[in-house]
DNA sequence: ACCCATATTGCATACGAATGCAAAAATGCT
DNA sequence: AGCATTTTTGCATTCGTATGCAATATGGGT
């Protein structure tokens, strides 16, 4: 109604006075599992409702040394995969009665400010989904005793937990799929080259191609960025010996790649050029693109991430764990089909070659 | 290095002891503008660095009654517009030295849990970008004395601040554009019907069309949701008197609409059907879609939102303010062009009819 | 060197809730 | 009813920092 009022801030003592009990009783009423009789609890509840009391989470945190806040660090949200992750994280964390403090933006080498924030707010845990500052920041947090889980990436020194999918397998699977599709010349549009996901996906791709005698992959650097991917693929398709199959390190870039191929080079997909992506993100399913792509089981990944974090928080033990989930190669229309190996599974078509 | 360590938690007293000063001195060292000599400040800083001290924001909040946390409530992130907003919000809030606590997910009528959280954490302000629970929640917060700014929506009772674009103007402009393009029959795919943005956009559209003698707009309900938009447009295009121009309440749905029109009905865009969207979100710029759309000046909107919030927090006065910014009709390839009125502006084509 | 104005410093307390401990009340058992 | 046991309750203290106030140190002017 009227404005200008400063925060009233009803305190537990006020409620206590009103209910004719001690402040302790009020505290216990709002502390699950505390020793309190139903009778006083009811009295307190009434008083609390009348005054509009809510326990002050800040004060509670101070004494319990638990903020019930989880920091989520995400470099950029341009790639729809991350907003999806974020939403799912929000849902699961809320279910566990945790809040989500979000940090976005590039903070590169200079991760200190972020780290400062994290420390200052005494967050109970950190979910790191930023390629750029993973290694540095994660170590700092780990030594500070804050549980950290890397999402969709790992570091060399595996002292810090992570949740990923089998990227190497994925890269390999894609190579096999393209080989089975009869492609002759192979390209790769990379993500950020130093990122673990990029390295692993490419490694698998290259291995499997090499095993089939293809050592000359045409590589362009996209840095997980639309514009750079466009530049890279433009150059790649301008070559005289242009590839007839390109694995793009994620769907976000694959979309851009398809647009360039079609509208700048007039290529038909998949007749002239096959594209395979990674993530199975929203736009990959849109009819205009229909990207054949390695799916990442987002829900299970998030579930694992939150689960691991909760475990570490509860136990106080920070034991590094690496959970690797499996994706599937979802077959759509952006790549030529192999003669065999495509199976139907709950409404989707999956490439699953029968290992002979 | 070694795990299992509980949070060490260096306190200001420890730093004080080490530096040979009082705890107050430490506090003042970390409080900008406090009275402290350069000499002691230096001593404190040294000690702090050695011990790895960071002020405990929780404890600070308790006494200052300022959490330096802003809550952002966003219903869903599926529409890329919102992740973009979120990223920009993160940037600006960080610049103001505020943290961003994110709440996502549908919470409909039952907004109480969210409200509880907000109150419990004593957030300094709230940015509401969720259509569904705007009106209810915003009132509660306003009466609780917490500054609230509605982002991209308003409520009837205008006691709470908001930042929007001139949606009605936008709808009108779109109608004028389509009329000038020589279209004969008009359709509309709505967002959530009760939302202020939807109402205003449609109102403007309808007004301008009515003024030109078109009273029979074909309407389908999309609820800002891809799937529902698909169903709606499928039905709309199946009619014998199908429209040759459709205004879709946002780009997120417009993309789905275009896919249905092209791939299910075999229509050519814009020859057979013109589509106009709203927001000018990422995919609208992708070549496959090239959506002609009313842009929303995202950066300026976010800037205004943060600015207003900061103002209210600083002054303690919660005076409702309604900032309405202007967008532009960005012309691309999804709609037939009028003969006149299209101008070039920093790399984009804009529809700007010269008022005769 | 002395005095006064100003800049620093430390002391003590406050913020709001949680919790160990001991006192008080409620319960069970014979 | 009487005693032992368990459950509830209140008291007092604690978390880590900020801040009003009084005490002290610093500096400038003569």
Image (cartoon, coloured by chain):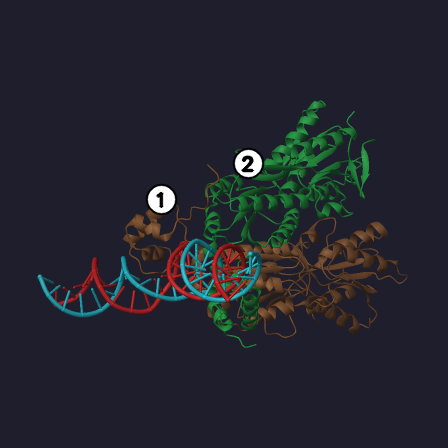
Chain colours: A green, B brown, C cyan, D red
Pick the front one: A299 or B83: A299
Instruction: Give the mark count.
Output: 2
Q: Residue furthest right?
A: B240
Q: Position of residue B1 (x, y in %)?
A: 46, 36
In the shown orientation, is residue A291 left or right of residue A36?
Answer: right
Query: Which chain is home to disc 2?
Result: A
Q: Which residue is mark 2?
A: A155
Vertical relation: B3 (above or below) A93: above
Pick the front one: A97 or A44: A44
Query: Which chain is home to disc 1?
Result: B
- Callout 2 secondary element: loop
- Callout 1 secondary element: helix
Pick the front one: A254 or A266: A254
Number of the label disc, if any, that sits on residue B50: 1
Mark 2 burial class by Cα count in 10 Å: few <14, some 14-19, many 20+: some
In the shown orientation, is residue A98 left or right of residue A351?
Answer: left
């Amino acid at each position: 109604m009227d404005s200008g009022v400063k925060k009233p801030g009803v305190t537990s003592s006020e409620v206590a006075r009103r209910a004719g009990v001690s402040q302790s009783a009020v505290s216990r009423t709002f502390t699950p599992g505390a020793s309190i009789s139903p009778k006083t609890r009811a009295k307190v509840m009434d008083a609390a409702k009348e005054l509009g009391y809510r326990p002050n989470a800040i004060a509670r945190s101070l004494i319990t040394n638990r903020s019930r806040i989880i920091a989520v660090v995400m470099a950029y949200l341009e790639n729809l995969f991350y907003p999806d992750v974020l939403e799912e994280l929000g849902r699961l964390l809320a279910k566990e009665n945790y809040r989500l403090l979000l940090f976005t933006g590039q903070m590169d080498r200079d991760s200190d400010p972020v780290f400062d924030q994290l420390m200052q707010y005494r967050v109970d845990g950190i979910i790191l989904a930023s390629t750029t500052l993973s290694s540095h920041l994660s170590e700092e947090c780990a030594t500070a005793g804050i549980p950290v889980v890397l999402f969709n990436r790992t570091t060399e020194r595996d002292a810090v937990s992570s949740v990923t999918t089998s990227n190497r397998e994925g890269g390999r699977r894609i190579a096999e799929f393209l080989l089975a599709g009869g492609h002759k010349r192979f390209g790769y549009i990379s993500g950020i080259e130093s990122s673990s996901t990029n390295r692993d996906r490419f490694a698998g791709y290259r291995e499997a191609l090499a095993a089939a005698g293809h050592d000359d992959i045409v590589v362009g650097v996209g840095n997980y960025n639309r514009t750079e991917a466009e530049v890279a693929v433009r150059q790649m398709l301008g070559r005289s010996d242009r590839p007839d199959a390109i694995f793009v390190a994620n769907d976000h870039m694959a979309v851009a790649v398809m647009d360039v191929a079609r509208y700048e080079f007039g290529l038909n997909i998949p007749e002239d050029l096959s594209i395979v992506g990674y993530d199975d993100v929203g736009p990959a399913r849109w009819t205009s693109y229909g990207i054949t792509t390695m799916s990442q089981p987002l829900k299970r990944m998030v579930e694992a991430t939150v689960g691991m974090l909760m475990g570490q928080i509860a136990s106080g033990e920070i034991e590094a764990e690496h959970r690797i989930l499996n994706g599937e190669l979802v077959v759509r229309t952006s790549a030529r089909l192999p003669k065999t190996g495509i199976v139907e599974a709950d409404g989707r078509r999956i490439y699953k070659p029968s290992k002979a």
